[in-house]
Image (tube, coloured by chain):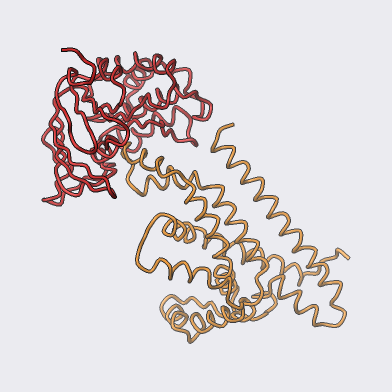
Amino acid sequence: MFDISPTEWTAVQLSLRVATVATLVATPLGIAVAWLLARRDFWGKAVLDALIYLPLVLPPVVTGYLLLLTFGRRGLVGAWLADHLGIVLAFRWTGAALACGVMSFPLLVRPIRLSIEAVDRRLEQAAETLGAAPFRVFLTITLPLALPGVLAGMVLGFAKAIGEFGATITFVSNIPGETQTISSAIYSLIQTPDGDSAALRLVVVSVLIAFAALVASEVLARRATKRLHGN
Amino acid sequence: MLRVDVAKQLGEFSIEASFTSEGRVTGLFGDSGAGKTSLINMIAGLLRPDRGIIAIDGETLDDTAAQIHVPAHRRRIGYVFQDARLFPHLDVRQNLDYGRRMNRLADDPAQRQRVIDLLDIGGLLDRRPGQLSGGERQRVAFGRALLSKPRLLLLDEPLGSLDAGRKVEILPYLIRLRDEARIPMVYVSHDVAELRQLATQIVMLRRGRIAAFGGVKVLPGTSA
């Protein structure tokens, strides 16, 4: 039963790579957006807020198709990227990472935003009076104090990215070795006669990954909180 | 020399204050709600006046007519808050060092040791703010502000959150600070006894306006 075939391994490794890249690229952007939403008032804030949460409420197929229209070979952004930077996203694993990043972005941003909002602004003022310019206040006070939220956001985002299916399969299809993640591999196996036991193996693997991510987040968050409050 | 001539509207409440102080310790006296904290927040650069001028030793920090507003982090004005506001994720040593790092000042172990001795906080350096008593926290906050080498030190009711016993514990340090640190201070308080011991000059604030200005004699209950 636990004899995982090379094809299945490829799907598992690809999923891990896609989710890791998606999370690592999305995190700095997510922190910046979370800070903007938590700390700044600007024109169009409500629109930005809605835009970020859109992938959470749109059918994933719609998000995937919109990505294809935008980042596809003939899409507005996709054509430019291909012509000028030689970057092709459609039907590549990098495209899968983009789809996963977009889909998991709301889950990544929310805990970070909440934890930045919870940082006492009076501490930031104190840092200013001690000579810290705004960006250094952010780096030395706000971000370290919001760290448990950042970790929570990263884990949630990672877990969502691992499981993403609809947008990914729409945007980059289901190509073994290139874009076939655990989810799309399970989907294919269920469609195949005699695929049941292989599908079940991948189901067990994905449950294990999700479980490990949640345990890791709990441990990290507890350690970060302990470090922040020193007892 | 500190020159303040500002106006600020805060909801229903307005502040209009003008004074010049040469004193070593300017006592800002008034009941709660008189506008004391808003006034020193303007001096610190944390609050922007609607109109007016703030200048220290001839350097303009705020001049609304000339559209000058030096941001708080470039003012080199230390601030000790009523609630200490130590950084919870840093130990005492790192809290004390924060201002030096942010101002990119050279390390000055002699000065650091002087401040640590003056405030008697040598035994606390490895602790986190969460492990300090209220009085210890406030002493570290004094040290943190002093070590950023400010040209003016603002103290907003630094004893306000402490009980009577703790006040008696801290007051001698403040007197030493005044006599040894050679940094002009603005000391906010509603406690006549505290100001009588510390201040060399009094600005009395009532409902956002200056009600009296002069030596400690202007404090209520002082017989000439």
Image quarter of the N terminus of chain B: top left
Q: Is residue B156 above or below residue B113?
A: below
Q: Residue furthest bottom?
A: A74
The mark tally for this picture is 0
Q: Is A6 placed left or right of A95 in the picture? A: right
Which quarter of the figure has residue B107? top left
**Of A149 and A120, which appears nearest the observer?**
A120
Image quarter of the C terminus of chain B: top left
Residue A68, x across and y down, in percent: 54, 82
**Of B75 and B165, which appears nearest the observer?**
B165
Q: Is A187 placed left or right of A225 in the picture? A: right
Q: Is residue A30 above or below residue B68?
A: below
Chain A tint in image: orange
Q: Is B125 placed left or right of B77 in the picture? A: right
Which quarter of the figure has residue A188? bottom right
Q: Please give the letter of the chain rendered in red.
A: B
Q: Is residue A229 above or below residue B195?
A: below
Q: Which residue does the image show at 66% across and 65% down from the upper left?
A: A162
Q: Which residue does the image show at 36% across and 32% down from the upper left?
A: B81
Residue B39, x across and y down, in percent: 24, 38
Residue B181, x across and y down, in percent: 26, 19
Q: Is residue B39 above or below residue B199?
A: below
Which quarter of the figure has residue B184? top left
Q: Which residue does the image show at 27% across and 26% down from the upper left?
A: B187
**Of A151 and B2, which appears nearest the observer?**
B2
Residue B43, x across and y down, in percent: 23, 38
